[in-house]
Amino acid sequence: MTSTVATRPTPVMDRLISRTVQNRRPLSVHFDLTYRCNERCVHCYLDHDDHGELTTAECITVMEDLARAGALFLTFSGGEIFLRPDLYEILAAARRLHFDISLKTNALLVTRDRVARLREFGVRRVQISVYSDVPEVHDAITKVAGSLQRTLAAIPLLLEQGLQVKLACPLMQENLLAYRGVMTLAEKLGIPYVLDLTITPMMDGSGGPLAHRASVSSLLPVLQDPALHGCKPQPGAGVDSAVESSLTSLGSAVSSGIESSAYEDLPCSAGHNSCYISPYGDVFPCVQLPQAAGNLRRERFSDIWYHAPQLERLRAIRESHLPVCSRCEIRSYCERCPGLALMEGGDLLGAYERACELAEQKARVAGIFEPVSALHKERQAASSHATSGNEFASLAGDSSPN
Amino acid sequence: MSSNSGVHWQKHPALAWREIDEATVIISPNESVMHELNDTGSFLWQNIDGHRSAADLAALLADNYEVTPDVALTDTLSLLEEMASKKLLVPVAGGGESR
């Protein structure tokens, strides 16, 4: 996920990230329990039919394997997780296994009783999708009348029980100008928010959701907005010799936008210390990199994680080896995603148009004069070469004897 | 021996934690505080089960690390007190809680 907010890790978190990247431990796992959903968001990349979800027992076996492999941060998502009738059994197992549990939900089915159970099972954070503070805008995206009202009604219930709530607002054509309202809403509620500029193709690679993607030029007001500071800073904590403690904005290292020096020269954390599991047991490096490394109905997690050739190949990639992007002069403005490079550009190692355009726009906003990405420079050079070749051919034609 | 050495402790049930490559990371969900235990801290953490007293834990520490029993007990009590103050541990009345 691309966010406008990057969180600096605490020293404890930074060491944890370094250790897990170095030793290839699956620190953070995103586990979709279902693709079924009670909303029909226009930009969604999922097929909502049930093609054979993991059973309760299978989910618990997967979590036991994850715990043994060293996974700590576990995010349950969907689809809509509350459509799983066995959600609480799964959460109870996650609690027994001592995971740090986060949920992603549209919150339509959240009630006071359900929140109490989330609290009972140690859920720490809940991320809720909110597309606008204007009901007509939000509901037009979810295609569910009254959905914003129901979603917002859930937030106080979660906060009352001490759960952390974060608003997630994917920005697209339909709600591009609504982001200020979402920011204000979050500030009124005293909770963090994240604006997400990423609209991805369907997981099968088809591009339907891309029709809703805002053009790079239309994103200019967002990129220029000085008010985008995202997560509120939290107070510090003491550090001592026996137990080092830090208040931290914890979570998936990728989806929360955490930056760490441990990721230096890595395209991202996918496959290094994080992964994604589909409701059908497929293990992917990331939800945005849908190349299955194996299936948990046929193999154990650790066999896939440590031995799948797809993950080995991914782990070998270094930013400095990328054929085009490593030469890009505006690389520091780019949020290139390997998964999108594959899905949109056809090459895991390649550059792709959207990232280059966004990087150029961000560089321009930062005051760089006429920034051009390496991909576009290559194209310009090729075009120039082709033009001069044509001119030569034309001249040759002119000078040929009659 | 300290009067606290007979207290039995158990891990706070709300915590998330994992031992990853010989260090233990613990997260307090209420405060979102992340704690990291060093090697000996991790060893004690693994053995805190609601059954063992501080004296039992100190004896284990002395058996597994090159420290005298007195030092082991002092260090164990200090660490237990610290972890209790951070709400990572809760006392068990009379011991005997399940692991």
Image (cartoon, coloured by chain):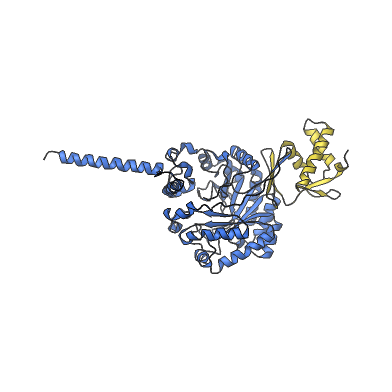
Write the residue at 76% across / 44% down. B83
Total marks in image:
0
**In this rendering, would A20 be left or right of A396?**
right
- Where residue A92 appears, as percent x and y from the top left, is 69, 55
- Where residue A166 appears, as percent x and y from the top left, is 60, 56
Colour used to depict chain A in the structure image:
blue
User: Of all residues shown, which one is farthest toward the left?
Assistant: A402
Relative depth, front residue between A345 and A191: A191
Write the residue at 86% across / 41% down. B5
**In this rendering, would A168 be left or right of A210?**
right
- Where residue B29 appears, as percent x and y from the top left, is 69, 51
Write the residue at 69% across / 37% down. B22
Relative depth, front residue between A54 and A380: A380
User: Among the chains, which one is yellow?
Assistant: B
Q: Is residue A80 visible?
A: no
- Where residue B54 appears, as percent x and y from the top left, is 83, 41
Q: Is residue A161 visible?
A: yes
Image quadrant in which you'd find residue A39: bottom right
User: Of all residues shown, which one is farthest toward the bottom?
Assistant: A145
Q: In which quadrant is the C terminus of chain A drawn?
A: top left
Relative depth, front residue between A189 and B52: A189
